[in-house]
Image: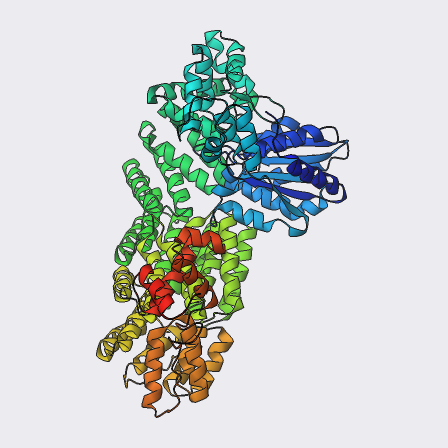
Amino acid sequence: MDLWEREGALVALEGELRRSAGGGRVALVAGEAGIGKSSVVTEFTRRAATTARVLWGACDQLVTPRALGPLHDIGRATGGVLAQRLADTAGPQEIYSAFLDEVTDPQQRHRALVVVEDAHWADEATLDWLTFLGRRITRLPVLLVVTYRDDEVGPDHPLRRVLAAMPTDVTSRVVVPPLSEERVLEEAARAGRDPRLVRRLAGGNPLLVTELLKDPGNDAPTAVQDLILDRLRHLPAAARDLAHLVAVVPTRTDDWLVAAALEDRGDGVAPVDVAIAAGVLVPAGATGDGLGYRHEILRQAVERSMSPTRRAGMHAAVLAALEGQGAERDVDPGRLVHHALGAGDPDAVLRYAEVAGDLAARQGAHREAAAHYVAATEHAHRLPDEEQAELVDHAAMECYLVGRFQESLDLWRRGADLREQTGDLEGMGNDLGWVGRLLWWAGNTAQALAVSEHATEVLEALPPSPALARVYGQLARLHLTAHRAGDTLHFGQKSVDLAKELGDTGTYLHSRMAMATARAIKGDLSAVTDLAELAVEADDAGYTEVAARALINVASMTPDELAEYGPVAVDRFATCERYVRRHDMDGFLEHLNGARARMHLERGDWTEALSYADGVLASRQIMPMNAVLPLMTKARVAAARGAPDAEQLLLEAAAATADIEDIAMQAPVADGLAELYIWRGEDDKARQVLRDALVMAGRTSQNEFIVGRLAWRLHQAGGDDPLPEVAAAPFRDMAEGRWAEAAAEWGRRGATYLRAMALVEGDETAAAEGLRILDGLGAVKPAEHARAGMRARGMTRVPRGPRRSTASNAAGLTEREAEVLALVTEGLTNAEISRRLTLSPKTVGHHISAILAKLGVSSRGQAAAAAHRLDLVP
């Protein structure tokens, strides 16, 4: 097939190749599935072969992506040191260095043209490599071409952070547009098809157009999949077997693999020609070395069409061929696991999954490692108890790192039982320590403490061990979350001393981190610096989980214990997120983003706050501990805007803290409930909630901002209780009438919402400014409460707030909310508004919730009617 309307993309790529002579360049080739990205890049590399050295690697849609898949493809093509480093499963830095040597080798006559195909399927290790390469690209004689499906790369897709890290001054986006309507109509007419039908069924997607034009008699909406299956049915048996074999191998099937898998039948290569001639298969790869389907959609259609038995048989044939050539071909163990799972071969899964998991973990691809290890544990009963326990522990750790907490908890329990059965009491104590940690995440603090103390008893009866040092550290962390600083320091010191004696660097660093956090909670700001330095020390030593924990502790303390909301706070969260994403430890993101939502609430960035809160709550595996702050954040915004479900959300958050001895979680919920009760005039209920929380805070925390917030809120609710000595200065100022000092301090700290609450207690000018802030947030309830307070203080000029009859923004809508409302009145859906305004659907939803609250209505139809009645839209 000719490359229809693709000369523009080819010219753009050729221009990038010329410019790369003066320094490295990046070309991003994005588009939907079937748009022709691979065809364009294949043609480009064919044209460039005389002036550039093409190094082509692909990412595959395996059950678990292969770690560093594109580099393995490149290594097989180049041989040399790079291939050797990959074969030796060297660390990432050694592999990266070997790649840099390969592309900067002065003996090569041409500069390198590096193609990474289908990056939307890239594993975490490949994404790290791309980030590494992007940061150095300007100093390399390389053109890096990355293809990906932009319709599969949403805002939270891990590829996004890699693309964002590419240097903008040398990065270009090569557009592969849909075919023009004129081209589709012209080609359909030439093929004797109904042009408008082809246009309706295929749009401008070249793959779909091509498939429809090949079968004039099929006009069904599912024509594309039906076409490939119909063609398949008309193939001779040998060619059909080949097509089925290729269908179970994602992306591309190497020629040698086809030959090996079909070798026993004696079919030779003749079926290949038949399948290609029938349009079922096409030569694949830049050099045509291998077979594939014209598009992954077609491969998946064929794979799904097979019976389970036949599909398993094809996987078994591929597995046997890979095993037969494994040593010679340096077969990635991830491919072996993929086909072992497809074949339903438990022995093969056990043989390869642990190897693949270990390799992925060492390369930083923890999601892939977890998938491999968990797959192996399904058949671990075939192993001796000792080996089974070791495998289960590996799976438990990887699940923990990627946030599969319930699976991790179940696996640690299983490991502890296996260790007990084998008499391995040290291993049992270690696993029980992890059970305690996960129980805390699940919100069962009492159980967590009991299990951890039991683990301590088991281990203290044995000679000193790293496991005992780790459990002491676990006890320190449990007491830390309850703000029992003395117990934290006691067990932390025991852990540090024992770990240092035994040379257990990871535990030594982890327990130092817990002790520094305890100091920070007590108000020792030097401990925050110590935690930042500890993160660097841990990272340098290769203890990435400890480094992540130190960064998370600093960030998550920032909103409550440190009361910072300005650029420093924003940067702490961003730094931490970059680190955990870079090291594939997404399991920490729920906790991090819950605290982040809390920070944006106080900053006055309520759309951001709700976006982070909803992102956490959308997780299918969320633990109760991680749900508290997002629920509280959503509830407080809802309460401020007068939404009826606010109290229910707060009560859900309170229920989630019922078994959690963590005042940093309980105090914000109590504060939110009290705030709501005050606005409703139920001051007695507010006082009871706050006094209970202050009693708990007095037992467990001396943090000045946690105690100070509760004490100020109690004063706001009419309580005449004396202010605790430890109450932070700005809260003390608010309670004692020094509103100007409080407002100035909250402004310095970036706490926009708290600043507004201080200002509305001031003189007429200050109160008016505070009301403007609240009205801008759509915070109708605190604004009403503030206006009532101003009148009670005898003020005669109380701003009325947004007027609903004459102002162009009569409901107090922001400019963006007014835009959204205008599109609601046109009848557009959230998805359509999202596309029109280039916002995420989630953000559109938050804007609409705010609009409904400001208009005092409960549906989109009522909002549209109110908009016309109040003359809010043309």
Q: Is residue 135 left or right of residue 559?
A: right
As drawn, 280 above or below 709: above
**Nearest the camera: 60 or 803?**
803
Quadrant where the C terminus lies? bottom left
- Residue 516 x %, y %: 46, 64
- Residue 603 x %, y %: 45, 70
As drawn, 621 above or below 595: above
Q: Residue 594, can we see it?
A: no
Which residue: 50% across, 57% down? 576
- Residue 7 x %, y %: 66, 35
Quadrant where the N terminus lies? top right
Q: Residue 196, can we see it?
A: yes
Colour mode of the rendering: rainbow
As drawn, 666 above or below 366: below
- Residue 119 x %, y %: 54, 39
How many numbered marks have been drawn onto this rendered protein structure?
0
**Nearest the camera: 536 or 193?**
193
Which residue: 26% across, 74% down? 677
Which residue: 35% across, 25% down? 346
Q: Quadrant of residue 20?
A: top right
As drawn, 519 above or below 397: below
The single residue placed furthest to the top in the displayed view is 266
